[in-house]
Amino acid sequence: MIFDYGPMRKDGQFENHPTEVKEVYVAPLRDSYIHIKCGGQTIMYGMDGVIRTYATNPGFYGGTFCAVCHGYFPLVIEGAPQFRWSADDTPVGEIHGEPGKDLRGVGR
Ligand SMILES: [Zn+2]
């Protein structure tokens, strides 16, 4: 099945994003991250499914959006993490921190 990302907004972000929330938390809930290359922060407003997917199924996404660069980028390039969570400075897509802990809003 092909996921329908919907239309692209003016800021370069698609309207829809796939989610795959698992039952068991393996990481905290975190809602904002820094794109290391530009230093800009992206906040996932109203994206509860994506936030919970990262907390239960961190390997699901291969890339993410940067609100400053207005584009999507891989989470890892040649072994180097490209994004870090604002809450605890750990790489997006890896498993770190207390599972299920609510860190939304922390670090921003
Ligand atoms: Zn960026």
Image (spheres, helix red, strand yellow):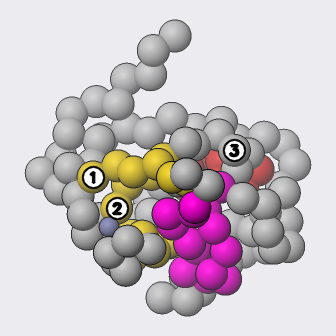
- Magenta stretch containing residue 87, yes or no? yes
Q: Mark 2 points at which residue?
A: 66
Q: On the rendered structure, is 71 left or right of 80?
A: left
Where disc 3 sits, the SS reads loop
Tell me if label 2 and label 1 are in contact, CB under 8 Å: yes
Q: How far apart are marks 1 and 3 (CA)?
A: 20 Å
- In x, y percent, where is residue 101? 79, 73
- Residue 48 sits above or below residue 7 on the image: below
Where disc 2 sits, the SS reads strand
Q: Name the residue under label 3.
A: 59
Q: N-terminal of the two: label 1 or label 3?
A: 3
Q: Nearer the viewer, residue 66 or 77?
A: 77
- Residue 6 sits above or below residue 73 on the image: above
In the rendered structure, which segment of residues is drawn in magenta?
80-93
Q: Is mark 2 within 8 Å of ligand 1?
A: yes
- Magenta stretch containing residue 17, yes or no? no
Q: On the rendered structure, is 15 left or right of 86?
A: left
- In x, y percent, where is residue 38? 32, 75
The amino acid type of the residue labelled 1 equals Gly
Q: Name the residue under label 1.
A: 71
